[in-house]
Image (spheres, rainbow, N blue to C red):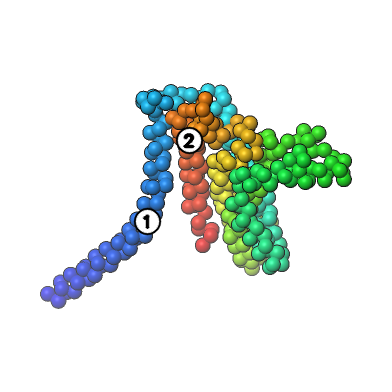
Amino acid sequence: MIQRRVGTELQGVTVGFLLAKWGSNIGWFLPYSLFALIFLVFPSWGLVGGSLHNVSGHLTFANFRQLFQRQFLEAYGSTILLSGLTALTGGLLGLVLSWAISVGGLPQILRSSVLTFSGVASNFAGVPLAFAFTATLGPAGLVTEFLRQHLHFDLYAHGFTLFGFSGLALTYLYFQIPLMVLIIGPTVASMGRWSDAAASLGASWWQYWRYVGVAVLWRPFLGALLLLFGNSFGAYATAYALTSGQVNLIPILIGEVMSGNVLYNPGFGDAMAVGMLVVMTMVYGLYALIHRQGRKWQT
């Protein structure tokens, strides 16, 4: 009788503990779920619904068929190329800069200054960034005039233009490199303890990088590249303000069909946005997979 009563009480305590823990988890999960529904699920559902209607409001699949025309396929290709190029370049340069900050023995005041600047520059985009680069590297920009007057070198006479694909890629690097510093910084900072542990076990510099360093770094680095890709893939204001819509990019085309008087077609704009959503879902899905597999190296 006593054993049965004790067993019943233990079961009650266990059930009560599980219910309390489950309720606590639900309490933390509900705000996130509400945020995701309002800012992710509902807008995505609205895009899909709008993409299936024409200007007159009738149901149609013509918007998605139009995506496979050459102009729009090239726009997707240009957007992916620009995002991939700036992500890879910004990722490599950001990794080098982050390594110099964390491992290179820079003075503390200089490290703090670089990190503070990275936090500001990673969010500096849009029209102000386009104006800043125009005033610096435009046809009459400060750097352009300095090179022309003092070094007798004309950037624009040698084929460079700020208002094309190459100039846009250079502008994107201004916020891609600092963002990489912020993302990869914690991982690079933790490399010191792995190096010390490998050295204490008698590993050489080559053995450390072959068996430990690359294994620790490659997943966070690749994940950071994917985040940089997504950061530039959806950028609109900087590209439009700098090039006046002359570069064939999907965000610019979406802006044209959503706000233009002649090309006004919100359904087709939604269809192009759905295409971007598919690409971004694949990118962030790959990032989540890499992050989950690489968490064991960050503990």
Q: Residues within 10 Å of mark 1 (few under 14, many from 20)?
A: few
The residue at which mark 2 appears reads as 273
The residue at which mark 1 appears reads as 31
For this orientation, the residue located farthest to the front is: 261
Q: Tell me the element at label 2.
A: helix
Based on the displayed image, in which of its 4 quarters is residue 137 positioned?
Answer: top right
Amino acid type assigned to the residue bearing label 2 in the image: Ala
Is 272 on the left or on the right of 135, as rendered? left
For this orientation, the residue located farthest to the left is: 1
Q: Quick one: quadrant of the N terminus?
A: bottom left
Q: Residue at x 61, y 65 (%)?
A: 193
Q: Tell me the element at label 1.
A: helix
Based on the displayed image, in which of its 4 quarters is residue 50 positioned?
Answer: top left
Query: Can residue 272 be seen?
Result: no
Q: What's the CA distance linking mark 2 and mark 1?
A: 27 Å
Q: Residue at x 86, y 43 (%)?
A: 149
Determine contact: label 2, label 1, CB under 8 Å: no
Q: Nearer the viewer, residue 134 or 270?
A: 134
For this orientation, the residue located farthest to the bottom is: 2
Q: From this view, report whether residue 224 is shown above or below residue 26.
A: above
Q: Nearer the viewer, residue 136 or 65?
A: 136
